[in-house]
Image: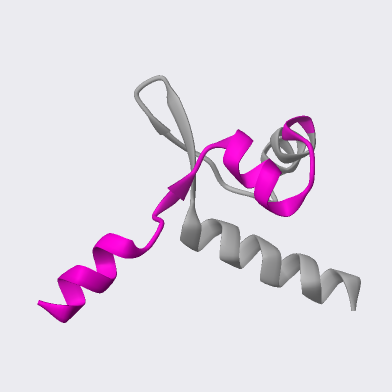
Amino acid sequence: MDREKRFSNEKLGWTFEELARSLSVSVPFLRLEVKRGRLKAAHLGRRVVLLDSDVRRYLAEASDRAA
């Protein structure tokens, strides 16, 4: 039960707009990062979603590149 409750509170994916707002970057910048292959995007029908696990990986790699 606790695992189910914890899982339901976790964010699984982001829209470009949500992630841009959260990271204080622009939507075009995020789209460019997807085009460059640095950030993965998943298509769910017409909707494009950035999976939380891919966002966390992207941020860790960006941090490594900056160091």
Asked whether 62 falls inside the magenta stretch, the response is: no
Q: Is residue 14 left or right of residue 32?
A: left
- Left or right position of 10 against 25: left
Task: Name, please, the residue furthest toward the right.
Answer: 67
**Observer-nearest residue: 44 or 1?**
1
Identify the residue shown where x is 44% and y is 49%: 13
Q: Quadrant of residue 26?
A: top right
Q: Position of residue 12 (x, y in %)?
A: 39, 54
Q: Residue at x 66, y 51 (%)?
A: 22
- The structure's colour scheme is one colour
Residue 22 forms part of the magenta stretch: yes
Main SS of residues in magenta: helix
Magenta segment boundaries in residue numbering? 1-28
For image coordinates 85% across by 70% down, the residue present is 65
Horizontal side of 62 relative to 42 (left or right) equals right
In percent of the image, x 53 and y 58: which residue is there? Answer: 54
